Image: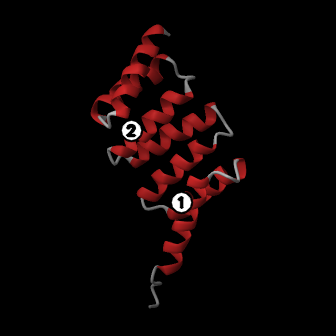
């Protein structure tokens, strides 16, 4: 566990510096050594997203959600990854789940509202 904590701390430091190339292997090691640490999966998922690896991001974030259900920012981050991956219907679902947990979660509300505005203004195939 001590080794996992060291990997997590190094991964978090790299994450905070937006050095995802360093953060990802440290956080992957942390999740292997302590597979019950939901925070390591959250930061790993957001780091993957920072590198444009959205499928990996979604997988890590969903693992975090399984380990610690009921955390609105996990759903928000899954929504962000789905949106970046071009899957707006899943993004909308995840933002709604975040708001079901915390109706006052402004980041999820703002993201959901912006997504719905964009989807409403997209030209349809008949235009």
Residue at (68, 52) in percent of width and height: 104
Vertical side of 41 occupied by 91: above or below: below
Q: Which mark is residue 111?
A: 1
Query: Residue 124, how many percent across, how many down?
Result: 47, 84
Which comes sooner in the sequence, label 2 or label 1? 2
- Whole-angstrom CA distance, mark 2 to mark 1, is 19 Å
| Closer to the camera in the image, 96 or 114 | 114
Q: Classify residue 36 by image quadrant.
A: top right
Observer-side mark, 2 or 1, equals: 1
Query: Residue 17, how many percent across, how many down?
Result: 32, 34
| Closer to the camera in the image, 87 or 3 | 3
Q: Residue furthest bottom?
A: 127
Q: What colour scheme has been applied to the protein in the rendered image? A: secondary structure
Residue that label 2 marks: 47
| Callout 1 crowding tier (Cα within 10 Å): few <14, some 14–19, many ≥20 | some
Residue at (57, 66) in percent of width and height: 113
Q: Residue furthest top?
A: 2
Q: Is residue 22 left or right of residue 31?
A: left
Secondary structure beneath label 1? helix
Residue at (43, 41) in percent of width and height: 46
């Amino acid at each position: 566990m001590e080794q996992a904590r060291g990997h997590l701390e190094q991964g978090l430091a790299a994450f905070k510096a937006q050095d995802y190339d360093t953060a990802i292997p440290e956080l992957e090691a942390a999740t292997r050594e302590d597979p019950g640490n939901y925070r390591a999966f959250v930061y790993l998922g957001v780091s993957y997203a920072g590198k444009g690896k959205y499928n990996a991001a979604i997988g890590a974030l969903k693992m975090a959600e399984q380990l610690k259900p009921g955390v609105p920012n996990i759903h928000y981050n899954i929504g962000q990854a789905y949106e970046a991956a071009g899957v707006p219907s899943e993004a909308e679902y995840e933002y709604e789940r975040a708001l079901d947990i915390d109706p006052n979660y402004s980041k999820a509300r703002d993201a959901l509202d912006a997504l719905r505005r964009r989807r409403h203004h997209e030209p349809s195939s008949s235009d």
